[in-house]
Image: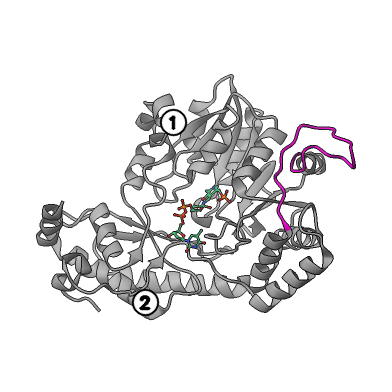
Amino acid sequence: MKHTVADLAILGGAPLFGDKVHVGRPNIGDRAFFFSKLESILDSKWLTNNGACVQQLEREVAQYLQVKHAIAVCNATVGLEIAIRALDLEGEVIVPSLTFVASAHALQWQRIAPVFCDVDEQSHLIDPSCIETLITPRTTGIMGVHLWGRVCDVERLSAIAERHKLALLFDAAHAFGCSRQGRMVGGFGRAEVFSFHATKFFNSFEGGAITTNDDDLAARLRLMINFGFAGYDNVVHIGTNGKMNEVCAAMGLASMRSMAEVVERNRRNHAAYAKELADVPGMRLLQYPATEKGNYQYIVVEYQAPAGCLSRDQLIDVLWAENVIARRYFHPGCHRMEPYRTLFPNAGHRLPATEAITDRLVVLPTGADITATEIAAITGVMRTAVRGGAELAAALQARH
Ligand code: T4K
């Protein structure tokens, strides 16, 4: 434990961890199952293009999410691009700026302008009360993002979308296994898109899924992920290559088999962080609703530096020196990244909550590899750093 400022690695003490402890460390699913699947993939000589593992993963995902169609894709970014095209979106689409840049890029990549909307300061989710003022004759859709695995106010968003005849799509990259009022994420809006990237609690190395209850849309999505082929030599639609391969699907199936264990571990980690951070000034740990299913995959802290204490960025520097690779997700907000900063230089004026939140965010490591003792050590550093007050802040300032 680091009880004094002088123990901190940034001031010359030994780092807390010999090896780096990262946010986003993958959870490795059932290894024996994965290896046996690899053997059968190699034996079958069927490596991609709607193979047996992909089909099995799609069935299992659809059943788990209680949705009619789950279409496996190579990653969520391509999944979003395909869903956006399949829904015929064009012109402008309303999307939060507080998200991973892929949500905005998936639109801009297709020359659709992302119109950035503010979020609710407590939940970090798109604020429905800000949406209607952003609607113009060019608006064709709303893309909600279930950030951190917390679920958007789907009822209000659906009502707005219906009233203005807009398509409602969800970036559900963070929300696999989460529910709202007992309904699993996957069936909301016209379609939802999940990420199974290595850094997600449920991973297929790279991958994702588009889910929908709309049969026609599902048929269209299936054509689009495979160049528009509707059988040998028969192309009936414009398409791309969005397919998931068999090895990724096998990893997804292995993750499926260890998912409950990982979620329980994440839930316990979250509770441990909550207990440890309760007495640290300036820290607010984002909570997950206890009555819903959650995946607890992000430990998100809003740090508002008490007067004179070290800043958020200094706190991150302190943690990195200890080999705790905390992140500032999703700083500085999409609207401050290119090309959006240049295209929409005034967007920040209507995003006060986003601007405030992005300056406070600290995302901490969790997952199957982190122990309660390590969490106590990480939070101990944070406590010592904040208690170091003005003296530590000045010492860190002097280092720059
Ligand atoms: N929408 C939202 C809301 C998203 O958050 C994302 C992705 C998407 C859409 C798009 O989904 P995909 O197209 O990726 O399926 C990472 C992930 O690459 C990205 O998938 C994720 N969100 C985002 C939140 O995080 P970076 O740029 O932070 O990655 P990187 O390389 O810095 O790695 C993150 C941390 O994970 C590091 O501390 C190292 C650790 N790590 C990473 C990998 C890949 C490992 O320990 N092992 C690994 O194999 O984007």
Residue 100 position in % (x across, y down): 48, 46
For residue 65, the mark is: none
Residue 277 position in % (x across, y down): 31, 68
The amino acid marked with disc number 2 is Glu
Q: Is residue 164 left or right of residue 360?
A: right
How many numbered marks, from 0 up? 2
Q: Residue 344, can we see it?
A: no
Q: Residue 225, can we see it?
A: yes
Quarter of the image for the N terminus: give it.
bottom left
Residue 122 position in % (x across, y down): 40, 50
Labels 1 and 2 touching (C-beta < 8 A) = no
Asked if residue 125 is positioned above or below residue 387 in the image, the reply reads above
Q: Is residue 333 left or right of residue 218?
A: left
* Boundaries of the magenta span: 224-245
Coloration of the structure image: one colour
The amino acid marked with disc number 1 is Tyr
In this orientation, which residue lies closer to the viewer: 286 or 232? 232
Q: Quadrant of residue 9?
A: bottom left
Asked if residue 237 is positioned above or below residue 312 in the image, the reply reads above
Question: Is the residue marked by circle 2 packed among few (<14), some (14-19), or many (20+) residues within 10 Å?
Answer: some
> What is the secondary structure assignment of the residue under circle 2?
helix
Asked if residue 247 is positioned above or below residue 19 in the image, the reply reads above
Q: Is residue 16 left or right of residue 274?
A: left
Question: Is the residue marked by circle 1 packed among few (<14), some (14-19), or many (20+) residues within 10 Å?
Answer: many
Q: Residue beneath label 1, please?
A: 340
Look at the magenta stretch and give its main secondary structure: loop
Q: Does mark 2's beta carbon lie closer than 8 Å to ligand 1?
A: no
Asked if residue 24 is among those painted magenta in the image, a careful observer would answer no
In this orientation, which residue lies closer to the viewer: 245 or 156? 245
For residue 374, the mark is: 2
Residue at (66, 66) in percent of width and height: 251
